[in-house]
Image: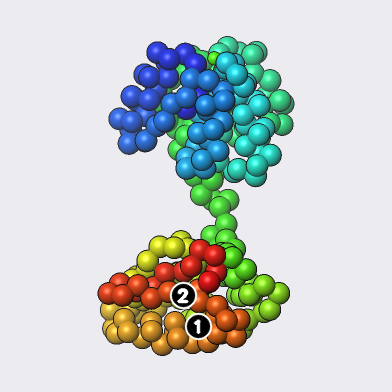
Amino acid sequence: MVEDEEGLAESLRRGLSADGHWVDLAHDGHRGLALARTGSYDAVLLDLMLPGLSGYEICARLRADDDPTPVLMLTAKDGEYDEAEGLDSGADDYLTKPFSFVVLGARLRALARRAAATADPHPTLQAGDLVLEPAGRRCRRGTHDIELTARELGVLACLMEQPGRAVSKQDILDQVWDTPHAIDPNIVEVYVSSLRKKIDAPFGRRSILTVHGTGYRMAPDGG
Ligand code: CA
């Protein structure tokens, strides 16, 4: 939430926290933009008139960075907010003060639903020059296309979703196999071995690292 009226900001923060939201506050435009740019928020509540940078400017800069975080603009009085300018800057919705807290909660839920509905369920995954497009079932290392089986692709996607993070064999099994309870997690080793022969060995690389006692992790730089 970027709001320079500190009393209002604090009361909104308390209300949203009580609803189970985690809220960070900024009281000026520059701090607000810096926080929003961390990309770690489900939504940004933006006051329009702020010291430093206006709500329009913050929103426009986020959109210029291709940041898709939903933005709800909070405006001081009817007429201050120019809907056309707000939409041009990339805002998703706006509320005119004074607004009811119940309406704010409902608007936030609506924004979250829309964001979830438009999110790409199969984003392109990347680790260095290793690229996986799960939707198109395509994998490539640099400019070289690599043929993967459906199962290999599933295992690799598990590892590439969070490069650098250790993923257990059981987690891979749960995500990639339909009946994971009936299968020995060590089957994952077979697929990791065949993946290494396709995505690493021919290129002299090591991208899938063994985490002893746990499973595997993807080198964030692609090995
Ligand atoms: Ca203000």
The quadrant where ligand 1 appears is: top right
Residue designated by label 1:
196
Residue 174 seen anywhere in this rendered image of the structure: no
Point out residue 64 in the picture as x, y percentages from the top left corner.
68, 39
Tell me the quarter of the picture where residue 30 sits: top right
Q: Secondary structure at mark 2?
A: strand
Which residue of the protein is positioned furthest toward the front in this rendering?
Answer: 204
Return the residue nearer the eye: 51 or 91.
51
Q: Measuring 53% from the left and 60% from the top, which residue is drawn there?
A: 121
Query: Residue 49: which quarter of the image?
Result: top right
> Residue 201: x and y, percent?
55, 85
Identify residue type, mark 1. Arg
Q: Which residue matches tag 2? A: 208
Q: Earlier in the sequence, mark 1 or mark 2?
A: 1
Q: Nearer the viewer, residue 154 or 161?
A: 161
Q: Residue at x 57, y 23 (%)?
A: 29
Reply above or below: 215 against 15: below
Is disc 1 placed on a helix, strand or loop?
A: helix
Label 1 near ligand 1 (CB < 8 Å): no
Label 2 amino acid?
Ile
Q: Are marks 1 and 2 in contact (CB under 8 Å)?
A: yes
Along the line of sight, the residue nearer the viewer: 195 or 44? 195
Say which of 160 and 74 sits in front: 160
**Residue at position x 60%, y 85% in the image:** 202
